[in-house]
Amino acid sequence: MAKREKTVVIDGYATPVSESARIADMVPVEASQVITREGEIIPRSRFATVPVPEAFDVYLSQINKGG
Amino acid sequence: MNTTLRICAALFETLKRYHLDKDLPVEKLSYVFGRRVQAGDRTILLIPNQAPVLFAPDCFVHQSGGHVSLDPAVFNAVLVEFAASDWDVIVNVHDHWFSHGGTRFSAVDDADDVAFGRYLRERFEPMLAHHPEIGAARAVTLAALVLDQTGLDGRIVSAEGATSFLPIDTVQVIGEHARRMVPNGSRTEHGAPAAPDEVHARHADFIAPETVRALAHTRIALVGCGGLGSIIGEGLVRLGARCLVLVDDDRVDVTNLNRWQGGRMQDVGRHKAQLLAERLTDFITGAEVEVVAGSLHSEQARLALRRCDLLIGGLDNDVARVTLNRYAAQYLVPYFDAGVRVQAGPCVDFQSRYFSVLPGTTGCLECTRTNLIDREAVTLALHDPLTRTARKAAGYVADAPELSAPSVYALNLRISSLLLTELLNYFAGYRRTATTYYDSWRNDLARRFDGDSFEDRPAEDCPVCSYYHGRGDSEPLPAPGGDAERIDRVLAQADAFARDNNNAPTAPAHDCALCATPPQCL
């Protein structure tokens, strides 16, 4: 059976997506690669240099936010 | 019960740029830090200007249009630095960039905040209690903001229950103009602005209902209820202010009646603050006025001021101005002040002056490039008794008799009117807010300065605008005579040290240059 599609407009372009698509599905992860405009954006490498003190009780879970 | 988050405008704009860039349609997460102030039943979170933690994309293990996950290793590095700092509020900020209003926290956000809140209570705080080398032991408040393109929602993750959230009722953005946002989950204050009532009907063409509403919701402290304060207080209520705290320890004297607005002979001897409160509540119903008929430096005044959102000084001394200047910086509260001077003698001159301090946006009394206060007199007044005596003995201080400055009603009216106009502009945003105004009647001089004509930014090396910025309760406010309690404590420690070391305090040596009688002429 052919997949049902709908057309949505993304950045001015008509784009066919599956009928069940959510916003999260429409946005490629790569889109986030240019968040470097204003304010100091801190790369992962900087955090890697922070020494974790002995006896520090680390937070093992992943911080998750979702719309 | 009311919860307010007070954030500096520059920081808030940085967060908005990071989170709500329409060209980058993905959710983002960031962190800012602050300090908590508990003022009666009001909780205030102070978020001063700072470098927010804005993550580059490689810090996220997943990032898409509707979801973002932070790498635990990155997050623990943030926690390590937070632990070592003196912040006690941690605010996670994320966005619903695709929403244009009415955004609320999702179930994913709820679960995440609850889990992290539990970690703070059950593991992080106990860890600090047992390992001071990691960071100072303290209670940590977790707050969360979610931004959308037009508004936001906010909450505190309650310490009382794992699943309870305390909504943030108001977000005050402290910048060049008053900006008050009502989060979507706020318990109060929703709905359209009230229609102008009859009292304000003649304002309605140029003071929008939103402005009147913002003014009515702002708790304003009027410090000094004398010749200036009695006029300013009346003007505030007539503009639409409905929530005032009046501070003055002075009583009406017969010599005040040439300028005390509405003062009558039968009022002589009454507390100025109390008398003004009665007048204001008489002619406008619904005004809530709290009276502090005591010193600005009293505990009662300190507690009352902590609940306020804006300060106005109708003062006649610079020590009080310096105190309010510090208060404004520590609690991120805008401060407006007016002063007058009559130059007597053959060339009579009437001079008036206004200035505003917008924490994080403009310079303060300490760092402004305009000379506003008598620094030597202020320094002297704030010395502790020991230092003052020592400086006096050393010839640095000359006692001067206290003089009653000449005062005139017309001049008080003039500068009060100007201050009220600038305050209205601060709320309405007609033009850039004036930082300084000065006029001299004799010299045909009247100058108004704002960011366009004279940029007066907070100085990086200003102790008030840097160190004390957003400090809240963690630093004491200046007090005349110094911090007597602290001095006693230090002296007691010195005595104890001498005792413990079998080393009694020594008498001054005759040949000591410092202990010997100082020279009369320096």
Image (cartoon, coloured by chain):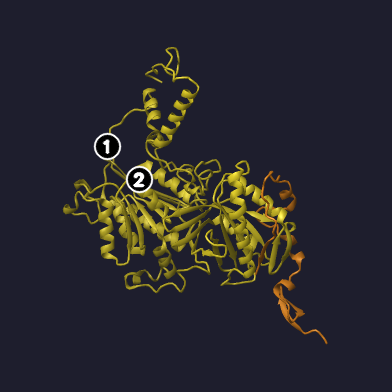
Chain colours: A orange, B yellow
Q: In the rendered image of this protein, does residue B57 appear above or below residue B351?
A: below
Q: CA distance from mark 2 to mark 1?
A: 25 Å
Q: Which mark is residue B505?
A: none
Q: Is the C terminus of chain B in the top left, top right, bottom left or bottom right quadrant?
A: top left
The spot of residue B34 in percent (x, y) is: 55, 52
Is residue B192 among the parts visible in the rendering? Answer: yes
The spot of residue B352 in percent (x, y) is: 35, 48
Q: Name the quadrant containing residue A11.
A: bottom right
The residue at the far left in this view is B266
The amino acid type found where label 1 is placed reads: Leu
Instruction: Answer left or right for B424 relative to B361.
Output: left
The spot of residue B22 in percent (x, y) is: 66, 67
Q: Chain of mark 2?
A: B
Instruction: Answer left or right for B165 relative to B299.
Output: right
* Residue, disc 2: B298
Nearest the eye: B74 or B482: B74
**Residue drawn at point x = 62 percent, y = 43 percent:** B131
Assign a secondary structure to mark 1: loop
Q: In the rendered image of this protein, does residue A9 appear above or below residue A45?
A: below
Q: Residues within 10 Å of mark 1 (few under 14, many from 20)?
A: few
**Residue drawn at point x = 62 percent, y = 49 percent:** B82
* Residue, disc 1: B403
Q: In the rendered image of this protein, does residue B373 appear above or below residue B278?
A: above
Of badges 2 and 1, the one in the foreground is: 2
Q: Chain of mark 1?
A: B
